[in-house]
Image: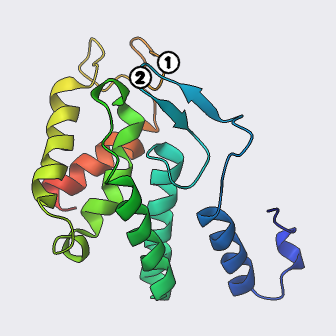
Amino acid sequence: MTLKDLSDFSTKEDAIAALFNHLINLKDDSGQFTFETDARKVDDKSWNSWNWPQGVALYGLFRYYELSHKPKVLDAIDQWYDVNLKQPIPASDLNVNGMIPTLTLATLFDHFDTRISNLADYLTQWAEWAIHSLHRTDYRGFEHDTFGNFNDQQLWDDTLMMAVLPLAKIWGGA
């Protein structure tokens, strides 16, 4: 599936609908964006994968849902979590970027709480993992370690999105 130039759409809504459909049907059939970890293959591009691109997209969809109130947007978010929460993430694969899908889950806590058993415990486990297990710099900031990349003593600005926003939402309700 390819997208046309956005100027080819007659309305913003048509462009957003095309982007939405493209996003939720995104697949890496070639394996170009798939890589091996100690525990499994990680697909960094396809929609149904627990990683940072999907987590950022989920939060974008949530924000779009806030504006549009379109049930299909919330349904897409629901379906993503239905698929991905059934596949536990091996402990060896946990990294700073894996936190971001919890942001939307925590943001929509009231929506998901009745559908996902032990949701508060699940989110607390992620938060506890981040606080106690994420590698730290000498200054105690979260080191930006990802799949196969250990960024020794590096603080990255996107760590705020990947880990700090989810922590604030999980523990602070911000």
Residue 166, disc: none
Residue 145, disc: 2
Tell whether 5 sits left or right of 74.
right
1 and 2 marks in contact (CB < 8 Å)? yes
Q: Position of residue 136 (x, y in %)?
A: 27, 19
Q: Position of residue 100 (x, y in %)?
A: 38, 47
The local secondary structure at tag 2 comes to loop
Residue drawn at 43 percent across, 63 percent down: 80
Q: Position of residue 64 (x, y in %)?
A: 50, 76
Query: Does 118 sit above or below residue 77?
Result: above
Is the residue marked by circle 2 packed among few (<14), some (14-19), or many (20+) residues within 10 Å? many
Q: Position of residue 49 (x, y in %)?
A: 49, 48
Q: Amino acid at mark 1?
A: Asn
Residue drawn at 35 percent across, 47 percent down: 87
Residue drawn at 72 percent across, 83 percent down: 12
Q: CA distance from mark 1 to mark 2?
A: 6 Å
Tell whether 119 sits left or right of 76.
left
Say which quadrant the C terminus sits in: bottom left
Query: Does 24 sit above or below residue 39?
Result: below
Residue 149, disc: 1
Q: Amino acid at mark 2?
A: Asp
Report the label total.
Answer: 2
Residue drawn at 52 percent across, 31 percent down: 41
The local secondary structure at tag 1 comes to loop
Tell whether 69 sits left or right of 164.
right
Quarter of the view holding residue 23:
bottom right
Say which quadrant the N terminus sits in: bottom right
